[in-house]
Each structure stands twice: as structure tokens, then as C-alpha cells.
Image (cartoon, helix red, strand yellow):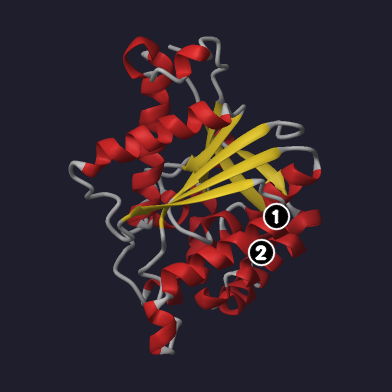
């Protein structure tokens, strides 16, 4: 997974996914000359379980967008967008699914990424929004590059030789899921947005690539702390208890055959 001097597009579900899920990798890439662009498909309005002040709950989407901006500065992310699709319901968009598809295509055309990072099949944590945005992003990229005569807009016709990007789904290998589940157990009690964690939709260690984030772990935690409304200290404390193979590495499933 070569991220040096590359142009990276991250498509995730919520403000804070970029920090908790791939913060170490993005900090590493930015430090090595990568230009990073980020999309959050939702405004994160369901993320109020750690917010006690009623006034702050009313302003949670504004607060979370500000926090995301602060986290992007920490990680070295060049641009970010926050879209307004429903938090907790990305798997049930109905007619709006086509709108999401079009927005992803427009963003690809604008950014022209060398690499696209989204969620792999297990969504890392089996969060329903993670799985949904990963599936939609992969489907859209496949359609866009495999059937350009049907999918590309007028804007993309100005760039007929856009390079097919490498696409990676961030994931947790099946061999490590049990240990990873420990840090999610308490958080999963606060929301119904998670599926059960079966092993058969998770890749093995032999199928994934990993990024060593030892040198950027402190930057990752600093970005997590930028999301102050989401109780970052609790999750960071759990991360600190993980074995090195989970704490110091982030795992990515290469999604191939986009040119077929």
C-alpha cells in the first residue's frame, strides 16, 4: 500500500471515523507527501450519548463538524466535506441512494484520487453505517470505472484518461476480532446501530495489508481527542490496553478487479 506523494480520497460514514479508524495511516501518509481529501456521509447527529448539556445536543451537528475540522488539521487532511445523509440509516436510503452515488462520483471526478479508502465488508466494528457506505463506495467506483460510457458525467469527459485508483477497505482481520471486540463492548451498549460480528465476512491476515502506525499513534490519539463530544478518552484508554498487533497497526483489504 504505497501512500507516499499520493492523492487519497477517504469516504466514511461519520465525523470521527477518520481519526479512530485510520488516523495513524492518514497521519503517516500526510507526513510522506500525500494529499488527503475526506468525506463524511452523515453529520453524526446520533452521536449524543456522551453529551449531557441539552443545548449542546441541539447543536451537535455544528459541534461535530467543528471537531472534524480540528481533527483534519491534526492529521494533515487537506479538505473535508460533511454530507447530510441520515445518521444510523445509510443502509436504508431508498431513493436517496442514487443521490449518494452521484455525490461520490462527483467527488471522484474532482479529487482524481490515486487511492480510495473506505470501509471493508465488516465495517471494522459491524456498524450498519460503516458497512453501508463501504458497499456503496465500492459499488460506485466499480460502476464508474468499469462502465465509463454510462456512469461518467459531462465533467469527467474532460478527463477521459483518469487513472483507476487503488481501492482499500479498512478492516479487522478475523484472527484479531475477538481482541478488538473488547474495546467496543461498552460502546455498543449505547446504540443499536451495530450488527453481530460473524467471522465469515472478515478477511484473514493473509488477505490484508497493514500499516505500521507506531510513529503516528500519538497523532492519531490527538485527532481522536479533537472529537471531544464523543468521549475520546474512554476509547483511547481501551486502545492503550490492546496488544501491539492491534494498537500499532491498521489493516486494509485491497479491493481489486476494478478494471475488469
C-beta proximity under 8 Å, tags 2 and 1 = yes
Image height of 194 relative to 229, above or below: above
Q: Where is residue 35 in the image (x, y as percent from the top left)?
A: 69, 38
Give me the C-alpha separation between circle 2 and circle 1: 7 Å
> Which residue corresponds to mark 1?
75
Q: Where is residue 197 in the image (x, y as percent from the top left)?
A: 37, 56
Q: In which quarter of the image is the C terminus?
A: top left
Image quadrant in which you'd find residue 141: top left
Q: Which mark is residue 233?
A: none
Answer with left or right where residue 5 lies relative to residue 37. right
Q: Which mark is residue 223?
A: 2
Among the two numbered marks 2 and 1 on one chain, the one whose residue lies closer to the N terminus: 1
Query: Helix or strand or loop: what does disc 1 sit on?
Result: helix
Image height of 169 relative to 193, above or below: above
Query: Helix or strand or loop: what does disc 2 sit on?
Result: helix
Q: Position of residue 107 (x, y in %)?
A: 48, 34
Q: Say few, some or many: other residues with alpha carbon within 10 Å of mark 1 (under 14 / 14 to 19 / 20 or more).
A: many
Amino acid at each position: 500500500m504505497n501512500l507516499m506523494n499520493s492523492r487519497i480520497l477517504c469516504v466514511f460514514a461519520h465525523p470521527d471515523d477518520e481519526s479512530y479508524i485510520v488516523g495513524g495511516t492518514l497521519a503517516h501518509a500526510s507526513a510522506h507527501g500525500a494529499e488527503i481529501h475526506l468525506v463524511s456521509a452523515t453529520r453524526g447527529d446520533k452521536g449524543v450519548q456522551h453529551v449531557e448539556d441539552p443545548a449542546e445536543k441541539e447543536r451537535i451537528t455544528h459541534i461535530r463538524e467543528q471537531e472534524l475540522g480540528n481533527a483534519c488539521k491534526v492529521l494533515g487532511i487537506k479538505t473535508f466535506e460533511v454530507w447530510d445523509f441520515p445518521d444510523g440509516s445509510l443502509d436504508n436510503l431508498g431513493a436517496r441512494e442514487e443521490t449518494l452515488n452521484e455525490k461520490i462520483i462527483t467527488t471522484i471526478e474532482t479529487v482524481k484520487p490515486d487511492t480510495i479508502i473506505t470501509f471493508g465488508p465488516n465495517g471494522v466494528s459491524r456498524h450498519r453505517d460503516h458497512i453501508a457506505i463501504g458497499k456503496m463506495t465500492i459499488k460506485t467506483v466499480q460502476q464508474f470505472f468499469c462502465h465509463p460510457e454510462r456512469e461518467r458525467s459531462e465533467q469527467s469527459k474532460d478527463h477521459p484518461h483518469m487513472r483507476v485508483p487503488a481501492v482499500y477497505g479498512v478492516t479487522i482481520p478475523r484472527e484479531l476480532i475477538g481482541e478488538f471486540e473488547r474495546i467496543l463492548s461498552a460502546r455498543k451498549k449505547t446504540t443499536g446501530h451495530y450488527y453481530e460480528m460473524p467471522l465469515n465476512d472478515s478477511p484473514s491476515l493473509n488477505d490484508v495489508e497493514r500499516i505500521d502506525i507506531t510513529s503516528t499513534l500519538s497523532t492519531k490519539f490527538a485527532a481522536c481527542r479533537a472529537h471531544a463530544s464523543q468521549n475520546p478518552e474512554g476509547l483511547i484508554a481501551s486502545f492503550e490496553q490492546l496488544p501491539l498487533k492491534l494498537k500499532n497497526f491498521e489493516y486494509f483489504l485491497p479491493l481489486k478487479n476494478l478494471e475488469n
